Image (spheres, coloured by chain):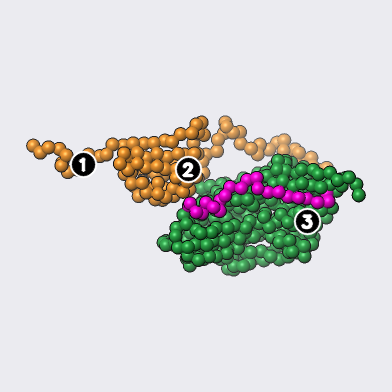
Chain colours: A orange, B green
Amino acid sequence: MGLGKLSFTALKGVFSKPATRRYPFEARPPIAKSRGRIHFDDGKCTYCSLCELKCPPDAIKVDRQGRVFAIDHLLCILCGACVEACQKGSLSMDAKHGEPWTEKQKLSWHTEAPPKPSGDAAPKA
Amino acid sequence: MGARTIIPFGPQHPVLPEPIHLDLVLEDEKVVEAIPSIGFIHRGLERLAEKKDIHEMAYVSERICGICSFTHGMGYCTAIEAVMKIDVPERGHYLRMIWSEMSRIHSHLLWAGLLADGFGFENLFMQSWRLRERILDLIEETTGGRVIFGSCKIGGSRRDIADDVMARLLKELASLEKDCHAITDTFMEDSTVAKRTRGVGVIAPDDAIALGAVGPMLRASGVASDSRSLGYALYPELSFAPIVEKDGDCWARTAVRVREIYQSFDLIRQCAAKMKPGPVDVKVSGNPSGEYWARLEQPRGEVIYYVKGNGTKNLERYRVRTPTFANVPPLVHMLKNIDLADVPVIVLTIDPCISCTER
Ligand code: SF4
Ligand code: SF4
């Protein structure tokens, strides 16, 4: 490399913008389709356990009787099989990777069964 | 004959991101023999086929390797599809080929950086990895993952690439291709790179064939062997010829990989031009019964997938022969009668992937 080209490259390096981002002050916005983290919406879930059936590493456990949905995010491989399996739209893939986990934990949700539409439990007036 | 010394090389060594161990038998500074030992990171993934069903095994296959992950998933799916006689739609094939060529570009850029680091050219290492970051962004945009694509499934592809994303992808790839010249020109023309690679670790074509070398390692010795010419997926539809160099030394292996980066850019463009709208997958039901060997070209060479199904949802036998496993005997051959200082560069030019090798 000639001296001219060498000085040109060196000067360009001095005056150009840094090639790297100043993380963590400047975080990169998440890429739209990124598989970041599984998001669970307990309002829509019917506790059918289809997602548990499809999950390759068994990260999801659903208790159908007790109406409990539990997910271990550290086991989850973010394959998206549960999102494809869920017919109720209660699982979705969040593009944001979220905060790192500081301890091992299973997140679980429980909702009470909706009141039965027919009144066979309630005494007739 | 001088006194012999044995120098242990690995499993922990600055040039090895993964553990392999070589006992180097030296006479003064010359290596007279290299004795390899592997088995540090065996994970028993083949046995997992007994516990995970055929669809879940696609995810397991992808995790055999963190660099050529996509082609592993594709090899497994190709083998199962052949057993079950599934016709993957055209668009599914084209998507698979685009992703496997993108993974080749990212793998070769990663390797180029490691090689530069191996002979102490730190700046070149950083520039190679800076460019690799851009292809990783494109992979993330189209598949959702940077390393594990998760986009190949039995029966086709799990995702599609929308037309506007494809247009952006092609534009970005064209600009990336232009920027790649700065680093590849350095690899090919710089005198310091040539000093460390020219005439080092030469393997003759006959030896390479006899010892079972595959991939860029074999092509650098002048043998035009590339599994993509066997015609899996829709490679026969593309204009493609294996890239060959004659010298069989570290420089020739570098040249093959550098030229393959540009070939992959071209193949992606060809795929994009030929792709028509349509379905990307077919519905799969039933279980495989029968056996098949699938041979695919990974960035490191030919991978062989053997599957044997017995009509249940679990495979009876699942076997993977990875390219690095095939390239270890030629490596041991090349390490004879060379200087100790050249060992790291020669080890790197086979592009070792040990996690693959041991599964
Ligand atoms: S998340 Fe969806 S698939 Fe899973 S139990 Fe709830 S409704 Fe069923
Ligand atoms: S993304 Fe995959 S691994 Fe994670 S919970 Fe869903 S099915 Fe299980």
Residue type at tag 3: His
Q: Mark 1 sits on what residue?
A: A116
**Residue shown at 78%/50% (left/top)?**
B34
Q: What secondary structure is marked by label 2?
A: loop
- Count numbered badges in the picture: 3
**Residue shown at 68%/38% (left/top)?**
A16
Q: Mark 2 sits on what residue?
A: A76
Q: Which mark is residue B333?
A: 3
**Residue A27 visible in image:** yes
**Residue shown at 42%/35% (left/top)?**
A107
Disc 1 + disc 2, Cβ < 8 Å: no
Between B86 and B286, the residue placed more toward the observer is B286
Q: What secondary structure is marked by label 3?
A: helix
Please state the chain letter of the residue tagged with numbered disc 1 in the rendered image: A
Which segment did they paint magenta?
A: B31-52
Residue type at tag 2: Cys
Q: Earlier in the sequence, mark 1 or mark 2?
A: 2
Q: Relative to residue B349, is residue A121 drawn left or right?
A: left
Please state the chain letter of the residue tagged with numbered disc 3 in the rendered image: B
Ligand 2 closer than 8 Å to label 2 CB: yes
Q: Which mark is residue B283?
A: none
**Residue shown at 69%/65% (left/top)?**
B225
Closer to viewer: mark 2 or mark 3: 3
Task: Please state the horizontal and vertical placement of residue A44, each as a whole percent of the image.
Answer: 33, 42
Please state the chain letter of the residue tagged with numbered disc 2 in the rendered image: A
Task: Please state the horizontal and vertical placement of residue B46, each as a whole percent of the image.
Answer: 56, 53
Q: What secondary structure is marked by label 1?
A: loop
Task: Please state the horizontal and vertical placement of residue B65, each as a whole percent of the image.
Answer: 60, 50
Q: CA distance from mark 1 to mark 2?
A: 34 Å
Between B148 and B204, the residue placed more toward the observer is B204
